[in-house]
Image (cartoon, helix red, strand yellow):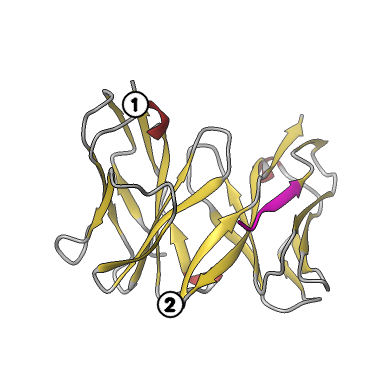
């Protein structure tokens, strides 16, 4: 079964450092997403990306965050200057339509710890 | 924004028991989804519901889309150890043709040996 893969699985970084989380979406998918989950809380939408541009972003996705699809296969989330409250599990997801629940697949997540 | 509230927050049951959990919203959803999350992993879709009143099964799981479109129920029959995890309901929110999922608060299921 096709899957979304994410790297790294866990990263520890110092406050103020830049972090890049990487994702390889499912190959024929066109819609890409980042979600995050703070420990013990629900999964929250960050940003959606289609046709090489952001289609929607949440209030969490401020100027410190950016996304990029640099080479047609990877999809990255960059946090320019990390804060303690950025510590969370970050999930990449991809889908082949703008929305249909049974075609959105989540990766296993990248656990970010900011110290 | 639209919020999905799940109850109960957590459940402690014995293996073999049936489980029932629900999800309610203050606003209408046209699709309801149920995901399961194992520790340290991403959400995995269990069941998708697309029509009010719909009842859908996936093995031992059964979910219903409430008639009011403001709630949904998930039942698990004859629970087994691998059912342990957090169950989230989710619904899509559409803005100008772009869609995103909003997740519920989760129900944590623990099976007592």
Q: Position of residue B14 (x, y in %)?
A: 82, 36
**Chain under numbered label 2:** A
Q: Are marks 1 and 2 on the same chain?
A: yes
Task: Name above or below for residue B26 compared with residue A20.
Answer: below
Query: At which x and y percent is residue B112?
Result: 77, 30
User: Can residue A76 be seen in the rendering of this structure?
Assistant: no
Q: Position of residue A104 (x, y in %)?
A: 47, 66
Q: Percent x, y for residue B10? A: 75, 37
User: In what element is the residue under mark 1?
Assistant: strand
Could you give the CA–CA distance between mark 1 and mark 2, rounded to whole angstroms? Answer: 34 Å
Locate the C terminus of chain B and report the quarter of the image it occupies.
top right
Determine whether the residue tagged by mark 2 lies in a helix, strand or loop.
loop
Q: Label 1: few (<14), some or many (≥20) within 10 Å?
A: some
Is residue B82 at all visible to an observer of this figure?
A: yes
What residue is disc 2 on?
A97
Q: Which residues are magenta?
A: B1-6
Nearest to N terminus: mark 1 or mark 2: 2
Closer-to-camera residue (B77/A78): A78
Mark sitting on residue A65? none
Other-residue count near label 2 (Cα within 10 Å), few / some / many at <14 / 14–19 / ≥20: few
Residue A76 is covered by the magenta coloring? no
């Amino acid at each position: 079964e096709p899957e979304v893969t994410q790297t790294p699985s866990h990263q520890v970084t110092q406050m103020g450092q830049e972090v890049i989380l990487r994702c390889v979406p499912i190959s024929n998918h066109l819609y890409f997403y980042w979600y995050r989950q703070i420990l013990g809380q629900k999964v929250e939408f960050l940003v959606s990306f289609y046709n090489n541009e952001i289609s929607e972003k949440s209030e969490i996705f401020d100027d410190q965050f950016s996304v990029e699809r640099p080479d047609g296969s990877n999809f990255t989330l960059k946090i320019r200057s990390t804060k303690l409250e950025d510590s969370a599990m970050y999930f990449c997801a991809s889908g082949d339509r703008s929305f249909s629940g049974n075609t959105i697949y989540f990766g296993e997540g990248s656990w970010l710890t900011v110290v | 924004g639209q919020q999905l509230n799940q109850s109960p927050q957590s459940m402690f049951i014995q293996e073999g028991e049936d489980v029932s959990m629900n999800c309610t919203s203050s606003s209408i959803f046209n699709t309801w989804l149920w995901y399961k999350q194992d520790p340290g992993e991403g959400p995995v879709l269990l069941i998708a519901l697309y029509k009010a009143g719909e009842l859908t099964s996936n093995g031992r799981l059964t979910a219903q889309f409430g008639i009011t479109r403001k709630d949904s129920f998930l039942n698990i029959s004859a629970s087994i150890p691998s059912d342990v995890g957090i169950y989230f309901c989710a619904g899509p929110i559409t803005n100008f043709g772009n869609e995103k999922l909003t997740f519920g608060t989760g129900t944590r299921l623990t099976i007592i040996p």
